Amino acid sequence: MRDWILHESNQNIIRISIRKLVLEGSIMKQSTKPEQAKHRSKIGGQALIEGVMMKGVHTGAMACRLPDGTIDVETWEEHNGKEMPWYRKCPLVRGSFNFVFSMRDGYRCLMKSAEKQVTEEEAENEAEEMSKFEQWLNDKLGEKLFGSILSISMVIGVAFAVFAVIFLPKFLIGLLIDHTAIPDDSRFVRSLLEGIIKIVIFLGYMILTGCMKDIRRTYEYHGAEHKTIACFEAGDPLTVENVKKHCRFHPRCGTSFIFITLIVSILVMCLVPLTIVWQRVLVSILLLPFVVGISYEFIRIAGRSDSWITRALSFPGLQIQRITTREPDASQIECAIAALKPCIPENLEEDEW
């Protein structure tokens, strides 16, 4: 009898293990093919620290899970409809402006979401530990202090990006060409090698940051954002169970946009007949608005087209989302739903991509 019970127990354990492996395998092999959407929405979002930010035609919202377990929702007015100024609607021009505005708003929400994770007790302790100089700055500048810190952080971030993605690849390939038999005047080879280093730096950064616990949770919120938007575009009611069914990969993702920008920059730099490193760096910076503009137009086309050409060109960016998105849990999906709902306009025609 005892042997029979042990045999049955082992069989149950084996069945559970097999189910778990099948489930994990299905998640790993999840198709990156964009889902057929009934409504292609303009709403976009960003993962925050323990939360999600969404921006719609008339309203923006951020929903954060507070330390006490509740969801804090903050909304604001947006002007992303017909009332947008010409430079945000003109093809090729709008890409750079929308990218800058998205970075600004996203970084501001990211900083706010970090503040929301500080409890009252922690805030009081920090206030007691502030130096006289810090207290003086806080008293004199108040709200302006946050804006100043935000601006400085953005400048440092942009400077680091320029160094890592523009200067460093060109400097390294310049050294390589100087010490090898690679022709110095080969624009195509030089641009291709620079592009490979850019992509390696980009992917390496994503993979390394993904190893950090806090960033992994942010990637899970990123997955929640994508799945929630996909659920809305499919016309399904916004419930946790419905959102779970949808794909965490989306063609309009910022990750795909950055990857497309890297590819476009490689192609554009193949046309530049300069070989001196500082000249190529300068030209790359000057051409950046043009490169971003082209990439933005492609993302717009990819967001509303199901042709085999756009699917093929979108495929690498969707695959990279396997790194930058993770399967979210129910609590993270609840945050994404709370952020999306205020952004849905009454007239869905205004929200058509």
Image (cartoon, rainbow, N blue to C red):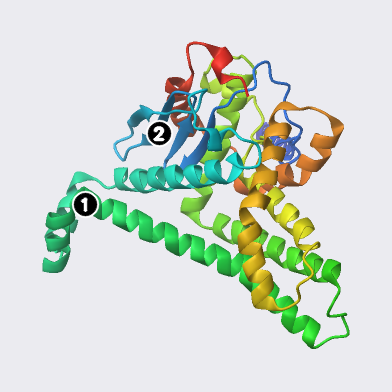
Q: Crowding near pointer 2: few (<14 within 10 Å), some, many (20+)? A: many
Left or right placement of residue 215 versus residue 193 in this view = left
Tell me the SS state at disc 1.
Answer: helix
Residue bearing mark 2: 62
Res 86 → quadrant: top right
- Name of the residue lying farthest toward the top: 347
Q: Amino acid at mark 2?
A: Met
Q: Is 84 left or right of 325, judged from the image as shown?
A: left
Which SS class for mark 2?
Answer: strand
Q: Which mark is residue 111?
A: none
Report x, y in % for residue 151: 37, 56
Q: Which of the two discs, 2 and 1, labels the residue nearer the N terminus?
A: 2
Residue occupying the point 79% across, 69% down: 273
- At label 1, the amino acid type is Glu
353 or 112: nearer the eye? 353
Q: Position of residue 237 (x, y in %)?
A: 55, 14
- Please give the residue where the numbered disc 1 appears in the rendered image: 122
Where residue 64 appears, as percent x and y from the top left, is 38, 36
Q: Quick check: can you spot residue 325?
A: no
Location of the C terminus by quadrant is top right
For image coordinates 42% across by 41% down, the residue present is 50
